[in-house]
């Protein structure tokens, strides 16, 4: 499977959720806030900013699942604005995670307020840097996305 196929999977999930939840309004802002919350949950699992604690990061699978929670909303936001990417932004830059979580949050806010392709790409580039620094490959991301996508369908079917 290729990265661009995730957009179609997300489009189908979004349609299913809209039908199941009877969504008949624009939920772009809600999805934007959800993306920011998911990014914060990801940062929390890495514990990269917790200078006061000696406890290490969560297990890799937990961090990866939080990462793909963000990917679901990032894909969905692009679909809402008819934006997409053909390829995963593979960016091999060793960076400080705290700096990149802050930068990513800033880019998300910019995109929410000015939803265009340039700002959308910037958010994806931030996620590319985060993925590299968290040690996630594109294959890791795709496999985790597929698993979480299936879980999200089950949640909808069971009244999540």
Image: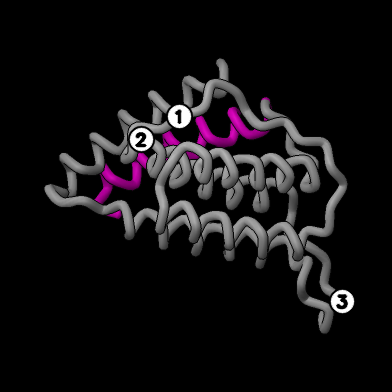
Please tell me whether mark 1 or mark 3 is closer to you in this view.
1
Point 83% across, 78% down: residue: 51
Residue 85, percent across and down?
51, 27
Residue marked by disc 3? 54
Whole-Å distance between the Cαs marked 3 and 2? 40 Å
Point 58% across, 62% down: residue: 106
Which structural element holds mark 3? loop
Residue 115, percent across and down?
40, 47
Q: Is residue 95 left or right of residue 106?
A: right
Give whichever of 74, 45 is nearer the camera: 74
Residue marked by disc 1? 84
Task: Tell me the magenta residue range.
Answer: 139-160
Q: Is residue 159 left or right of residue 129?
A: left
Give whichever of 71, 145 is nearer the camera: 71
Quadrant assignment, res 128: top right
Quadrant assignment, res 19: top left
Q: Is residue 53 left or right of residue 7?
A: right
Whole-Å distance between the Cαs marked 2 and 1? 7 Å
Of callouts 1 and 3, the N-terminal one: 3
């Amino acid at each position: 499977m290729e990265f661009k196929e995730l957009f179609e999977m997300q489009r189908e999930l979004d349609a299913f959720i809209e039908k199941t939840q009877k969504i008949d309004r624009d939920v772009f802002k809600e999805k934007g806030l959800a993306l920011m919350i998911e990014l914060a949950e990801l940062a929390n699992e890495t514990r990269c900013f917790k200078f006061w604690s000696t406890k290490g990061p969560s297990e890799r699978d937990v961090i990866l699942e939080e990462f793909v929670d963000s990917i679901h909303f990032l894909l969905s936001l692009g679909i809402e604005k008819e934006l997409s990417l053909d390829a995963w932004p593979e960016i091999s830059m060793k960076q400080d995670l705290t700096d990149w979580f802050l930068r990513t949050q800033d880019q998300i806010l910019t995109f929410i307020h000015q939803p265009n392709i340039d700002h959308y790409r910037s958010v994806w580039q931030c996620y590319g840097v985060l993925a590299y620094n968290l040690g996630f490959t594109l294959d890791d991301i795709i496999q985790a996305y597929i698993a979480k996508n299936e879980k999200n369908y089950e949640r909808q079917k069971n009244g999540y």
